[in-house]
Amino acid sequence: MKPAVVALVALAAAALTGLRPVAAAPAQSGLTIFAAASLTEVVDTLAHRYAEAHAIPVKTSLAASSILARQIEAGARADVFISADREWMDYLADRGLVDAPTRSDLLGNRLVLVAPATAAIRPDPDLPALLRRTALLATGDPDFVPVGRYARAALESLGVWPGLRERLVRAENVRAALAFVARGEAGLGIVYATDARIEPRVKVVATFPPGTHPAIVYPVAIVHGARPQAGAFVQYLRSAEARALFEAAGFTVLPP
């Protein structure tokens, strides 16, 4: 088995045990929300508020979309899936594991280049030159992780992928890539704009032009066989309360 596959399997096993109870209510069936790691804070907050308002226990599992999709394929119990790209939602849809009529594009994001906050790196309009100067560049594994896929597309578009692919730190998810830069273990990192906002130890040195990579889209869908409350939770994600939280975190809320 290839090392990358071994690592993915190990990560899936570890993440499968990472469900976090948000709230509990006696004698009621609850919900399990699988969501991309970049949504951690906002989804945890929304789950907590929903659980309190409806007296329904809600659990969240936050990890790379690739890990979560593979878990669902393997039979993990999930009611709602929010992916950081369309590809992993397509992966489940092709296997009949999400209910197609409930699928919609929920959020948008931006791709940014970050450096340690203390680094003597200043924003540079010549993005390819800035990228070529780094010794190590952290982002999600472009073979599996959505942010890595967006990053690879951007690097290919800018003509710097061949020179950087061997200097790439392939993280298991976007938050892991962010941590590499925050700790100074990588000189630069490619993450989402929303992730850069929550980490004071990094600074944004460039934003990738939208035309250099596919649009960053977070689709949501109800998982096949989900509990009845799943539909109401997905509707809640479209509420004014949820919209305010998403926008405050830096996401773009897409129309249904």
Image (tube, rainbow, N blue to C red):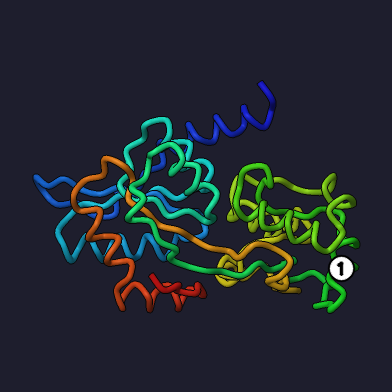
**Figure label count:** 1
Q: Which residue is outermost to the top?
A: 1
Q: Would residue 56 appear left or right of 94 to someone viewing this image?
A: left
- At a point 52% along the width and 54% down the height, the residue shown is 86
From the viewer's perspective, tell me whether residue 85 is left or right of residue 223: right
Splitting the image into 4 quarters, where does residue 120 fall?
bottom right
Q: Secondary structure at mark 1?
A: helix
Observer-nearest of 45 and 5 = 5
**Callout 1: 10 Å neighbours few (<14), some, many (20+)?**
some
Q: Residue at x 33, y 54 (%)?
A: 101
Quadrant where the image shows the C terminus: bottom left
**Is the residue 70 above or below the residue 35 in the image?**
above
Q: Which residue is mark 1?
A: 130
Quadrant of residue 131 within the rendered picture: bottom right
Q: Is residue 242 above or below residue 135?
A: below
Q: Quadrant of the N terminus?
A: top right
Which residue: 9% across, 45% down? 27
Q: Image height check: is 18 above or below 193?
A: above
* Residue 82 screen position, x and y as percent: 42, 55
Residue that extends furthest to the left in the rendered view of this protein: 27
Q: Residue at x 21, y 51 (%)?
A: 57
- Quadrant in the picture for residue 150: bottom right
User: Is residue 12 shown left or right of residue 24?
Assistant: right
Q: Position of residue 130 (x, y in %)?
A: 86, 68
Q: Taking 131 as reference, is 140 left or right?
A: left
Q: Position of residue 59 (x, y in %)?
A: 30, 49
Q: Label 1 is placed on what type of residue?
A: Leu
Near-viewer residue (242 or 59) = 242
